[in-house]
Image (cartoon, grey):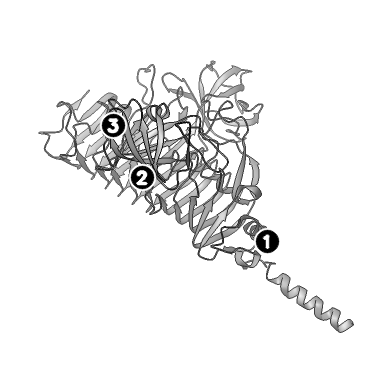
Amino acid sequence: MIQRSMLSAVLTACALSAQAASPGDTVRAADFGTRPGTYEDALPAIQRAIAACKEKNAAVLVLEPGRYDIWPEHAAEREYFISNTSSETECPSKVKKTGLLFERMENFTLEGNGALLVFHGKMITWVVDDCRNITVKGIRVDFERPSMSELTIAAASDSVVDAAIHPDSRYDIRDGNFQWYGEGWGMKHFHAIRVHTADSTYWYDNWAPFDRSKAARTGPLSVRFRGNFRNRKFVPGDVITVRDPIRDHVGAFINRSENVRLHDVRMHYMHGLGIVAQFSEDLTYDSVFVVPRDNGRHIAAFADCMHFSGCRGQIKIEDCRFNGAHDDPVNVHGTHLMVQEVLGPRKLRLRFGHAQTYGMEAFFAGDSTALLDAASLKIYACPVVQHAKLVSEREMEVEFTKDVTGVKKGDALENVSWTPALTVRNCRFEGTNTRGLLVTTRRKVLIENNVFFRTGMHAILIADDASGWYESGPVTDVTIRGNTFQECAYNSGSHNYTIAIEPEVKKPAPGNFVHRNIRIYDNTFLQYDYPLLFARSTDGLSFTNNRIYRTGFRPSGEARANIRLEDCIHVKVERNMEKGFGKIEVSK
């Protein structure tokens, strides 16, 4: 009996060793029950493997190649207030379902080996929260039923449209009424973008004529719509992509974390805002592709692809590709909070201005800040925070280390400490009806050797505002070099500048310039139209040694200046090579 008990104990210890990770060990998810290709819920087994890594400080979690399905029933739930997502009315609860959840972990790598994670329902696919030194690599992410629906125009007249429904887009027809639906969700509100596949352009559209028409199946994935389609100008091959505009989740979330690296990550579809990094520092995204899988879909991102709000340190985005976004591929910014009340010479009550951004702590003790007039964006004081407190989901109170004079209700406060340096290198931006890259950060910015192909709006926008999205702040050192800009801003009307430096100055202050030191050189511009560059309120702007070629992509508008300046000084435009427009003209 004693020998048998000892043997049993030894066998039990051996069995447990497969699941108990020692410090520095590699843990295999298969040892915890993951079985690729079964379509069963892999999340409980993955959660057990993550828990073992966390408990024993294991360095690597390995997934075997194959398909893993992630269902919402066992997803963790966390309350996250995430920048630029949803208002109290749009999404009252901020409790989110999360797939792979990495909380309070350090020195850890998820090694995916090309594993495909297929998500069901609506959830954040993976979260890195309060972590240090994390690497996520070798994973592919998609949804069984994306929250984006797609149909292709087969034939069209003023009263009849024949369409092919993408197999991933579930639908039903009841009493002639066409309805999109998904796993646990339906659609009541619609935001549509048309993909003109003949020339890879993306345009705002309207789902209303389909919603108001009568529909009938003509095949398993074929539908005939009868209604008023006059002036729609549908072309066979056009793809209508449609979603509910509410951003109730994000694609992935990096929150209050440090030194996070994404390598060889494919996000084939993301529901919500995209990969959002918030109050995190030192982020490296290397070979991250936000592109559809090779299954005929056109959209990979419900909104942005990558979004950085209130981050710091160095952000590096290298060798990445963006194709198929319903909003901007990359947006880097801070957040202006508005002065609601002056509580004393050192104390202010602040309020989040935009409906979709609120609830997060935006200032911390020791942070450097900038106080500014919201209309002119003129900074008049740079106090340091002594204390900061979130007093409600919409309001914060901050107390400074010294008295501040001249503050009034309606002014804005930016957190200067939480602003990142940015490098965007060797990336390709395409397949979007909006901008390619938005940059508003005062640290060093380098944008080099990228391709911007037919972005619907500006390829690069440098903004800053305290009245719309409240996205801060000024830039002070920007280099844009070695890039190729091909036929961008085609859907922007007469304001179709490839690069726009456009702070939202409502009331200029004499002698005040929002942006400084922007250098644009050694780039190639393949332009169908005249506008190259728009700049406002900038001190120190150079546009030199660039090559500009006129193409026949679309008809040009009327002849006008290639570069337009508003309230700019110390501008240098020289040594540019032009072919097809006559000469580079500048208007002031």
Q: Position of residue 182 (x, y in %)?
A: 52, 41
Residue at image x 61%, y 66%? 30
Q: Which mark is residue 446?
A: 2
Q: Nearer the viewer, mark 1 or mark 2?
A: 1
**Which residue is painted at 12% across and 34% down in the image?**
581
Which labelled disc corresponds to residue 449? none
Q: Which residue is mark 3?
A: 491
Residue 506: % across, % down: 39, 18
Count neighbours of disc 1 (C-alpha within 10 A) and say few if under 14, some if 14 to 19, many if 20 or more.
some
How far is disc 1 from disc 2 in space, using C-alphas?
40 Å
**Residue 294 or residue 539, whichever sits in front:** 294
Q: Is residue 2 left or right of residue 406?
A: right
Say which quarter of the image contains residue 49: bottom right
The residue where tag 1 is placed is: 52
Cα–Cα span, label 2 and label 3: 27 Å
Q: Earlier in the sequence, mark 2 or mark 3?
A: 2
Q: Quadrant of the C terminus?
A: top left
Query: Which type of secondary structure does the marked residue at label 2 adopt?
Result: strand
| Sequence-wise first label, 1 or 2 | 1
Closer to the camera: disc 2 or disc 3?
A: 3
